[in-house]
Amino acid sequence: MLFLRSNEEHSDEELFKIKQLRQLVEKSDELHVGTDEVFLTKFLHYTNWDTFRAYQAIHAYYDFKLKHPTWVAQHPVQYYAKIFYATQCRFVMPHTDKDGRVLVIFKTVDAFQQFPDYLQHLVEMDDLIFESMLMLPRVQRNGITVICDLQGTTRNFLRQFSPMFMKIVNEKNTVLPFSQRIVHIIQRGFLMHVTSSLFLPFMNKDFKERIFTHDGRHLNKLREMVGVDCLPAEYGGPATNVLDTNLIFNHLSQNSEYLEQLQHYNKR
């Protein structure tokens, strides 16, 4: 099952490192966060089970949140329901990619007139999605694959993408605790190439090496890299693979209590 959340079985060494990290966090006067296993193991997987680096990664994440408090979700899950269903721009596929990574699809859909704070909503929705993915043992182990379909990009989007916005996107990318994150950008036409050329210069070298671009008219490379069976029908996957907002939003709703709890974690 894609969203299986049953506790992982850990080796004695891993259990020791979970306990060690928990003690470090509990002793910190600055961190006001949880110490449950799901929270701790996402940082341990991210740092290849190096306890001290995991502790540093927690600090780095909450330093970012302290510096940029509007770049994380700030409302209950249900608050975002209208925009999820009105825009149909955020999805998770029911099957993992060929390397066992959960596949998330982000589309650019222009809804600036309908939602005045649209870009802010997208920032918070993406934070919810990433945090919900990081709850899953398979994502902590294998990471995720993200397809960014920019074919719906309009000038309204380009007006929002200031250098400062791009820099903060890169800052957040450097602290998100995914053990691996592969990004595929689908673009077509002048505006789409402009969009990706705006983002890429601000990405750090390591992350940039995991970003792949594809012409929306020719997706053979995408199918080869990700695997056909997991892709939506519109990208050449099986006809039964339809993009369904219910899949991601139901997952968020079922874990709303924990996701809302995370919003209160901070560093002082």
Image: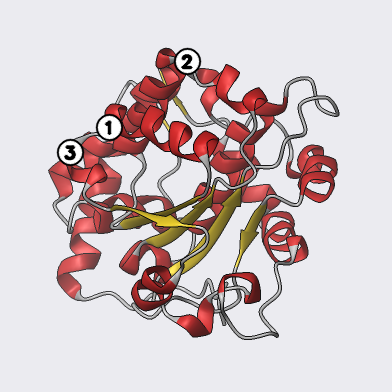
Nearest to N terminus: mark 2 or mark 3 = 2
State the image coordinates of residue 241 (x, y, percent, origin top left).
66, 79
Report the residue at 33% width, 27% height from top. Answer: 171
Q: Of the residues tagged 2 and 1, which is closer to the observer?
A: 2
- Say which mark, if any, is on residue 205: 3
At mark 2, the secondary structure is: loop
Residue 72 higher or lower than 167, as above or below: below
Residue 20 higher or lower than 71, as above or below: below
Residue 23 higher or lower than 199, as above or below: below
**Are the residues tagged 3 and 1 within 8 Å (C-beta)?**
no
- Say which mark, if any, is on residue 127: none
At mark 1, the secondary structure is: helix
Nearest to N terminus: mark 3 or mark 1 = 1
- Say which mark, if any, is on residue 27: 1
Q: Quadrant of residue 111?
A: top right
Amino acid type, label 1? Lys
Nearest to N terminus: mark 2 or mark 1 = 1
At mark 3, the secondary structure is: helix
Residue at the disc numbered 2: 162
Regarding residue 120, the answer to whether it shows in the image is no
| Mark 2 to mark 1 CA distance (whole Å) | 40 Å
Q: As rendered, which of 58 and 138 lies closer to the eye?
A: 138
Report the residue at 59% width, 48% height from top. Answer: 151
Amino acid type, label 2? Ser
